[in-house]
Amino acid sequence: MARPREFDEEAVLDAAVECFWARGYEATSVRDLIEKTGLTGASLYNAFGDKRSLYQTALGHYVDQSVADRIRRCEGLAPRQAIGEFFAEIVERSLRDRERKGCMLVNAALDVTPHDPGFQRIVAEVLIQIEAFFRRCVEAGQVDGTIARSHAPEQLARHLLGVLLGVRVLARVRPERALLEGVVGSAFALLDTGDRRR
């Protein structure tokens, strides 16, 4: 029978996320993780395995707490509003990011996945889920008339995914409201029906 954990796993994962998110995978040492989480090296290894395994668990925790949570909340809204709220939250989150850490998922895509096929699959799967959310919204919006039918749902969903990634990368270098809202606004012009444009 497995012994119960003698620490708060969620708090440890929150601390690991902060560490990896601030420094990146390569620059984060096991010593950094020990200091941030308050666990011994042995406890970290026993609970999560090696550094790569802990990073994978921390990234999954981050995705569930941010990306997946945002999708869950937005899916309860009307389709066009869901996309608008999703991006409004992304812009605000980017502007509040004083340390310019960006999005941990996007950081993983740029820093880790080029050298690690396993993480490439993990990140790709999350991006597919985001694209699927956009596609569901577009399809529903085209049915209820709040999103233009001038482009196929899969085209618009992929475009929105590209805009999302672009905004998150831009915000690390130029966290300017006018810039980020301008990029998002141009994408939304593709969604607007003739009535909305008028």
Image (tube, helix red, strand yellow):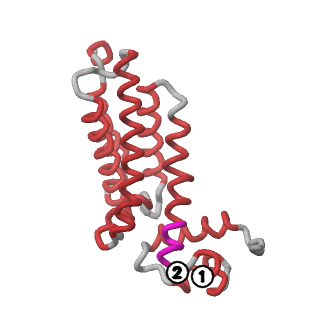
* Image mark for residue 45: 1
Left-right relation of 122 to 58: left
Start-end of magenta stretch: 51-57
Task: Determine the main secondary structure of the stretch shown in magenta.
Answer: helix
Q: Position of residue 122 (x, y in %)?
A: 41, 60
Amino acid at the residue labelled 1: Tyr
Residue occupying the point 68% across, 67% down: 9
User: x, y percentage for residue 63?
Assistant: 50, 55
Secondary structure type for disc 1? helix
Q: Quadrant of residue 132?
A: top left
**Any magenta on residue 55?**
yes
Tell me which amino acid carries mark 2: Asp
Q: Earlier in the sequence, mark 2 or mark 1?
A: 1
Residue 155's label in the rendered image is: none
- Quick check: 147 above or below 155? above
Separation of disc 2 and disc 1 at Cα?
A: 6 Å
* Residue at the spot 38% in from the left edge and 63% down from the top edge: 107
Circle 2 sits in a helix, a strand or a loop, which is it?
A: loop
| Vertical comparison of 193 with 48: above or below | above
> Is there CB contact under 8 Å for labels 2 and 1?
yes
Image position of 39 (left or right of 94): right
Name the spot of residue 167 as percent of width and height, x first.
33, 49
Residue for point 49% across, 63% down? 59
**Left or right: 191, with 80 as reference point:** left
Give the image location of residue 85, x and y in percent: 47, 35
Quick check: can you spot residue 6? no
Q: Is residue 93 above or below residue 56?
A: above
Give the quarter of the figure containing the N terminus.
bottom right
For label 2, the residue is 50
Whether residue 76 appears in this view of the structure is yes
Question: Residue drawn 36% across and 60% down?
Answer: 121
